[in-house]
Amino acid sequence: MLKKETLTKTPVICLLALISCFLWGSAVPSIKIGYQLFSIASDDFASQLLFAGIRFTLAGILVIILGSLLQKKFLLPRRAAWAPIIKLALIQTFLQYVFFYMGLAHASGVKSAIIVASNVFLSILIATLVVRYEKFTLMKFIGCLLGFSGIVIINLAGGGLDMSLSLKGEGAVFLSALSYSISSVLIKKYSADENPVLLSGYQFLLGGILLCICGFATGGRLNVPSIAGAALLFYMAIISAVAFTLWGILLKYNPVSQVSVFGFMNPVFGFLLSAIFLQERNQAFSFNGLISLLLVCVGIYIVNRDAKIESSAHETVSDTDNG
């Protein structure tokens, strides 16, 4: 596993965060293709939960196996780790995806993508104003505003935005984004004392089992998949296993704002990959698409630069105090 000194270098943060975001972005077309292969209707909420539950249960098993191989011993949580694991399983996996699938069934894809992008704002606000892990600065706000503007632009390119709002639609999507934001801060907190790979593996396993129980109990069923369906489900498990594990490791060693701001790339990758694999939006490679990508990249750069300046200033003060 990479050392702390390596994981705090900006190029490494960018590379690992972008790998995570690319994987999460690929989940957008993968889920839609998966619904077709498994014959899951767009309004079949129970089967969608069951599908997600199987995906995350597999992801948990993969992370635990991979983590055990890397550690050369089986990853087994100590007693004190179970409370953080249960909280993360409920917030990051169970509640986030229950609210997400509920909201997606009652809100347009455009509005959902824009609301989900607010999790970057929420993560940074919670980290700076609630738990105070870092300072809230004007540059962080400007960077987030630019990144969010890019997400709005790329989604408006496809049309379909209106001002209608509903609690079970847009409200549920917002609660999903809030759950994700809270979980990002909790990962930062809990990984100070626990292995982030262990946390990821067991919270996925527990959260996935809860989703399976909930989906099955409410009438969810899955048809026997083809080889292509099984392969896609396995790939989606890999998406979660790799992306969330890398994200958790980055959050352990870096400011929440510096990592979370890369979340603006999730819908960008999702938009571009959907355009390639689903032929959904020809606007992806248009002028609006390029402007959106530029705004997101500038926003990420501003927040990362501000976080590095803040980190350097903190290290200077610490060295002065020690001297």
Image (tube, rainbow, N blue to C red):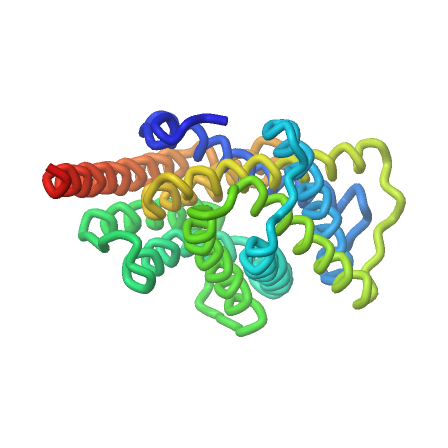
How far from the left and from the top, in percent, is residue 303? 27, 42
106 above or below 3?
Answer: below
Q: Can residue 237 be seen in the rendering of this structure?
A: yes
Residue 238 percent across, percent down from the top left? 65, 35
User: Which quadrant, please, contains the C terminus?
Assistant: top left
Looking at this rendering, what residue extends furthest in the right direction?
Answer: 224
Q: Residue at x 60, y 27 (%)?
A: 70
**What count of labels does the image hold?**
0
Task: Give the vertical position of 38 relative to 291 (above or below).
Answer: below
Q: Nearer the viewer, residue 90 or 280?
A: 90
Percent x, y of residue 14: 38, 30
| Towards the viewer: 266 or 62 | 62
Q: Is residue 81 left or right of residue 150?
A: right
Left or right of 94: which side holds 133?
left
Q: Residue at x 58, y 36 (%)?
A: 26
- Which of the 4 image quadrants contains residue 119? bottom left
Query: Residue 145, position in %: x, y?
Result: 28, 51
Q: Residue at x 31, y 39 (%)?
A: 300
What residue sits 49% from the left and 31% below the top?
A: 19
The answer to whether residue 97 shows anywhere in this view is: no
Query: Does residue 318 appear to the left or right of 152 in the view shown?
Result: left
